[in-house]
Amino acid sequence: MFLTSPGSGGFLAEKDGRAVGSAAFLRYDTFAWIAMMLVDPQERGAGIGTELMKQALAAVKNAPCVGLDATPAGELLYRHFDFVNDRHLIRCKTLVDPARFERPAITARRMAAPDLPGILRRDREVFGADRGELLASLFNRAPECAWIAERGYTFGRPGHLYHQLGPIVADDCDTARALVAHCCSTLAGRRFAIDAPQLDRQWLAWLTSVGFEEERPFVRMFRRGDKRPGVPARQYAIAGPEFG
């Protein structure tokens, strides 16, 4: 996505012929996202992260809004570049046990290709930008994680160590729970992660009740003065820190 999306890309920091750091940026139509800010632990403190951040910001300087998700270790660096906190998130993981997911009262079904145009129209409002290319890619990569209900939808993707479930978009907590329950009840034994904004205590409590354990926090940040995109209250899980 970073290499093929228009206006997107990345930077690599090298030392003595080896990679010691990276940064990537993804340009949506109405805002830009910075991600994959990584520095070799043995090389931290040498200014590599600062230089990568300068390059990434220069690449998206004309974007009306710039955001990123920061770990506690990276938050101070981003504050130096005048980024401010917007909302907190938590990564939760579980090994799926279908017995923990009661049959939900709200009906959901597997997503089909003809559903995508309508979903993308709804998602533009909720996310605040057109991420149709990303969602279509997620649908094709992991159709087993793509579910739709009358008032919401979810996508997912496979990873090396675990599956990522998200984005989860819903009008209410009950719909979000139903989407996760329908999806996970068919995927016994798989390890899943959900990156959930800490906006709805009922939602977070339900995730804990079905076996998700909190792993680490992070914080969403935006460049000071930028208008925040989308409708956060309907985003029960993000697509991951890589994609906003």
Image (spheres, helix red, strand yellow):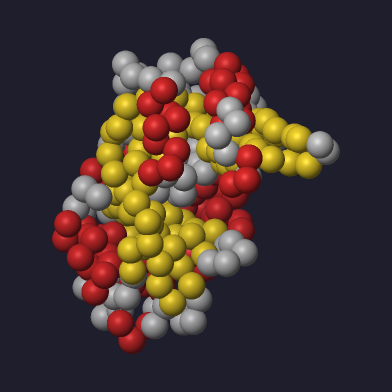
Estimate the x, y position of residue 188 in percent, counting from the top left.
46, 82
Q: Residue at x 40, y 67 (%)?
A: 93
Q: Nearer the viewer, residue 118 or 87?
A: 87
In the shown orientation, is residue 202 left or right of residue 207? left
Query: Which residue of the protein is positioned furthest toward the bottom in this rendering?
Result: 99
Query: Is residue 143 visible in the rendered structure shown here?
Result: no
Residue 194 rendering spot, x and y as whole percentages? 40, 59
Left or right, 233 with respect to 16, comes to left
Report the residue that reaches farthest toward the top. Answer: 62
Residue at 34% x, 41% y: name it. 219
The quarter of the displayed image where residue 157 is located: bottom right
What quarter of the picture does the N terminus occupy? top right
Camera-side residue: 83 or 206?
83
Q: Is residue 241 left or right of residue 151?
A: right
Residue 162 appears in the picture as rendered: yes
Residue at 50%, 76% (x, y): give it: 190
Residue depicted at 52% across the width and 32% down the height: 34
Residue 46 percent location from the top left of the image: 60, 31
Residue lying furthest left: 202
Q: Nearer the viewer, residue 10 or 237?
A: 10
Coordinates of residue 142 in the picture (x, y in percent): 57, 62
Q: Quadrant of residue 86?
A: top left
4 and 58: which is toward the camera: 58
Say how many tags the image has: 0
Q: Which quadrant would residue 228 be assigned to in this image?
A: top left
